[in-house]
Image (cartoon, rainbow, N blue to C red):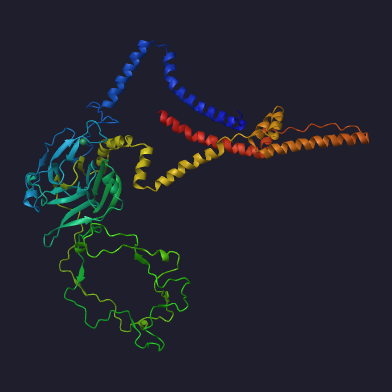
Amino acid sequence: MKVDRGWIWRVLLLTSLVATAIRAQDEESDVQISDADELSLNEEELKVLVAEEEEEEEVDVSGKDGGDENVSFQVIYKTPVPTGDVYFVETFDDGSLERWQLSKTVKGDADEEISKYDGKWAVEQLKENRVPGDQGLVLKSRAKHHAIAAMLARPFVFKDEPLVVQYEVNFQDGIDCGGAYIKLLSDTGSLTLEQFQDRTPYTIMFGPDKCGEDYKLHFIFRHQNPLNKDWEEKHAKRPDVDLKKFYTDRKTHLYTLVLNPDNSYEMFIDQSSVGHGSLLHDVVPPVNPLKEIDDPTDSKPQDWDERAKIPDPEAVKPDDWDEDAPAKIEDPDAVKPEGWLDEESDFIPDPNAEKPEDWDEEMDGEWEAPQIPNPACETAPGCGKWKRPMINNLEYKGKWKAPLVDNPNYQGAWKPRKISNPDYFEDLQPFMMTPIKALGLELWSMTSDIYFDNFIITSQKEVADRWASDSWGLKKLVASANEPGIFAQLMTAAEERPWLWIIYLLTVGLPVGLLVLFCWPKVGRAPTRATAALKTASSRHDLDSVLWISSRKQMMATHIRKRTFHRLMWKRRKRRRRKRRVQPIKKTKRPRLPRLQRLLVGPASSASVVMIIKLALCLCCCHICSPLKNNRSR
Ligand SMILES: [Ca+2]
């Protein structure tokens, strides 16, 4: 069987590269064994060492509560301890809810049957990405009212220190419609956690809330009007970022609110700022009412002209303006096509149809054959009465209207006059809110298993950050380690965006196509005279022959022609020298070029370039395939 020698070279090159990669891997795995050999350990000593190593590994990964089969990546977890002054912390890691009080009352604005706060709470580990030893508070019931609260270690009084509130939320089953916000309950003097319900006065409400496609991060505070003593909710403007992923990725996210004595506020998710502003200027409705308001007794005068433009009163309809001209007319130039069948109709009763045997004329009426397209019309340009096609009427102008001109009596848009606001007040310190005495969750959700953890209320952002790194940071670490591989992520992305499949196909198909185009062996052909000549040449000019093999038939033919030409020229010169009886010229040896130069400028330079391109492509393919192979072997 004849095999293209160029293809053999390529296969040998690829094989050597693959073998080198495999050998490098094998050498890595052999290192440990050779280490043991060098230390001259016998089999028993080696077993003891291995057992000790395994024991150490078990201690490392089990943490304080031992290993967990559901945890694919484990870290050593220690219940976090606050590193500064705090008003409230809760980790739930002791598994109890002793500090918390379940509400024993009913919701204020609900029907009696569904008004009970009978939703269940539990202290559990996360369903996914667990940190061994870490537990949190979980909302367990669907479509039920939940209320639970705990007193602060001491009330937070708004003076000259910031308020920092932080906690974790994980929508373990996603979220259809429901909230995961907290309420910081006001120190009203009559606060009873057993009576905690939707109408219990709160100072601040903060946290995620979602229904339908409306993703919110609430920051609401209650402000008292100093004049009439009414309480009003002030809503911070919406965050600037797309919040959807925080509700759908089933990861634990960290929510932080910072209020400063200078009335500025900032909200963070996972320690990244998602919104900031001023309590004075960036809340709705504003804390301070307007100084002036529209006079409610003022009304627009009847003769107030708000028309900026009016029809020109002096314009006159032109005499030749025909308002009655139709928009479309019959085409006067149209001609009936030849062969038009005026007497035939487009549909006829099916001549092959038969009345069904069970047709009851009394019940079903008189039987008629179903209509079918008229076969006579199939070859004709048309059937039935011919009508001229309709075209646009060039004379059509429509209804005449006078052109618009500026209104000389225009007075502008009317506005009521301004008067002083009788309810005006100015509160320049909305930060000075009602002191906070307790933290409560009063929630309703259509999706259960919402996880809460690591509540902290402090005055120092650094304390909250350190608390987060000791708690939420580990959850994030475990979740990152358990992330699906790049292949699974690509599949997930393509499920949401099917057009990505086109990109994938192009990305994979292009290199494969190039590989096949340049590396596939040529189909064997019958040996030619050029091939035979090449074989004889190969023994004398190894390198050139190899290059010729990979070149095309034209190259071989060119070489033969050149050799034949040189031989003829040599014979001719010999004959001339004999005739002229001159001494033969000493043959000067042609200087031999360096190998690379011969490759690039020699007689087979074009073949060399093609070969170099092919080798470069093969090397690229090997380079791409090598890491994939390594990943698979791992
Ligand atoms: Ca915890």
- The answer to whether one can see residue 602 in this image is no
Q: Viewer-proximal residue, 127 or 97?
A: 127
Q: Quadrant location of the C terminus?
A: top left
Where residue 118 sits in the image (x, y, percent)? Answer: 10, 44
**Residue 306, quarter of the rendered image:** bottom left
- Image height of 391 relative to 145, above or below: below
- Residue at (40, 45) in percent of width and height: 501
Q: Residue reaching furthest front?
A: 357
Query: In the picture provided, is 190 more to the left or to the right than 498?
Result: left
Q: Quadrant location of the N terminus?
A: top right
**Residue 473, quarter of the rendered image:** top left
* Quadrant location, ligand no. 1: top left
- Residue at (35, 82) in percent of width and height: 399
Picture mark count: 0
Q: Viewer-proximal residue, 615 or 115?
A: 615
Where residue 443 sits in the image (x, y, percent)? Answer: 15, 47
Query: In the picture provided, is 551 more to the left or to the right than 126?
Result: right
Where residue 280 sits in the image (x, y, percent)? Answer: 23, 58
Query: In the picture provided, is 249 more to the left or to the right than 20?
Result: left
- Residue at (70, 31) in percent of width and height: 532
Where residue 178 sits in the image (x, y, percent)? Answer: 19, 48
Q: Viewer-proximal residue, 528 or 432?
A: 528
Q: Viewer-proximal residue, 49 or 115?
A: 115
- The answer to whether one can see residue 310 in this image is yes
- Image height of 7 relative to 395, above or below: above
**Residue 84, quarter of the rendered image:** top left
